[in-house]
Image: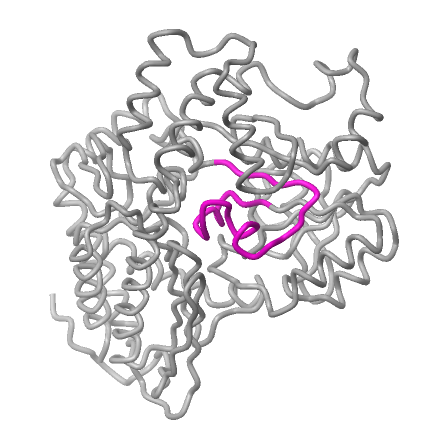
Amino acid sequence: MSLRRRGKPKDIIIGFTNQAIAWSRTSSHINCEPKGVLVVIDRMLLQERLKLEEARFMEDHPKSQTLFQQAKASLLDGVPMNWMVKWPGGFPVFVESGDGAYFTDVDGKRYLDFCLGDTGSMTGHAPAAVATAVTDRVKHGTTFMLPTQDAIWVGEELQRRFGLPYWQVALTATDANRFALRLARHITGRPRVLVFNWCYHGTVDESFITVSDGASKSRQGNIGPAVDPTITSRVVEFNDIQGLTRELTAGDVACVLTEPVLTNIGIVHPDLGFHEALRDITRNTGTLLIIDETHTMCAGPGGYTQAHGLQPDFLTVGKAIAGGIPAAVYGFSEEVASRIRAAMSLEDADTGGIGGTLAGNALSLAAMRATLGSVLTPEFYEKAIPLAERFVVGVQKVINQYDLPWNVTRLGNRTEYWFCKTPARNGSEAAKAKDSVLDPYMHLASLNRGILMTPFHNMALISPTTPADAVDYHTSAFEEIVKAIVR
């Protein structure tokens, strides 16, 4: 197949030259100021290259393709979880094993893993301390509906890291957020919650709301909602202090649920002073503040909350804290704990919509103790963050070299490049930069070169087990992938 451009030039992406770089140690914005204009990406060529990458993927993964066809007989659309069908290439690779920053598929191909379970394996795959603790715990029983001594150690460690005195354990961050929302509504007597546009809090019903042209509505793809989220929720743009004030002044919002930095629509950092304003407004209106640190644990041992001195009423976190074993926690202040005790009776403890038979199980707690005690330590971040900085420098070098209208940002050991020339300030700005052809091309071309990026957006998590030369390999592959679609 010839890849030479045919016909009249059309469908191009405009690139900007002379892009300036500015960043800080714990987080980075790469700011690009347009000074000149160059045509850089040919959309027809992009389509042709995507077809070539798809053909290459099919040829290189015969066993995964066979297993995918077999799985269709027992699993809906051939996958155990529905969104796995969205991996580019027509089917997902089937994994054989993982270790550190790498995994191997059933076709024997080894991949540098920058997805890391979309934070679930941010520790790297199969960390030794967790593997040992989990193996020992399995031999002695995994769940009892009774506490183990590990629970006390985990509670005290969470106190130390996040500064909140009381904690409870769930199985997923979604559950932790759900439980926190229920408690907030219960103790405040208020019916609504507020979230930010294009937020991500797992499958929490109240968060599937968006705002467009000033009107709130259910997010596209919100499957079978029990209640229209416009009834349960208010929504404003991230960094919109005026909108936040307007929506909370009515006095019917129990809590604000937010990540300290948006992460699932690209990395969207808070404006200077935003978190101080958020905390002041919530306190002045009697609204509780829930900080979801599930993705932002990448910022440091105590997440963004510890790194930046935030003071939430509730804090939720899951995924990485148990080294890949299902576990999550939610903590709350002394005042919230007092209000919970005053508003709940012992008789309702098992029927209030909070908890679960497997929540707080012995296996999850053993994994959390091992992870927090031996893996997600200050040393983890001291090694991982410089590697993430190296990743950002490499990507920015290629962006500059080819005058791409893209930007790359970082939060701790989490990095992301996005298809807009300057970092977004809110979810709407980030969403506008999505590209239904460029995105699968970048992902599939990376996968064909032995690199797994996080699906649905261009995020890379860097664990301390990632070799520095592997980061450099990504830079080279990234340049090759970009160069293939540049005229």
Residue appearing at x 21%, y 47% in the figure: 112
Magenta stretch: includes residue 303: yes
Which one is nearer the viewer's eye here, 33 or 133? Answer: 133
Does residue 176 lie above or below 43 as drawn? above
In the drawing, does residue 97 fall left or right of residue 31? Answer: left
Q: How is the image coloured?
A: one colour
Choose top left, top right, bottom left or bottom right for residue 246: bottom right
Does residue 362 lie above or below 83 as drawn? above
Does residue 97 lie above or below 436 as drawn? above
* Residue stretch rendered in magenta on the structure: 292-318
Residue appearing at x 61%, y 42% in the figure: 163
Residue appearing at x 33%, y 30% in the figure: 78
Q: How far across and down, in percent of the image, does residue 210 sit?
A: 65, 55
Which one is nearer the viewer's eye here, 140 or 265? Answer: 140
Magenta stretch: includes residue 90: no
In the drawing, does residue 418 fall left or right of residue 395? Answer: right
Q: How far across and down, in percent of the image, does residue 21 sit?
A: 38, 78
Which one is nearer the viewer's eye here, 483 or 7? Answer: 483
Q: How far across and down, in percent of the image, does residue 272 sit?
A: 61, 70
Q: Which quarter of the rendering shows the N terminus?
A: bottom left
Choose top left, top right, bottom left or bottom right for residue 348: top right
Does residue 92 lie above or below 395 as drawn? above
Q: How far across and down, in percent of the image, does residue 475 sit?
A: 21, 64
Q: Which quarter of the rendering shows the C terminus?
A: bottom left
In the drawing, does residue 188 fall left or right of residue 156? Answer: right
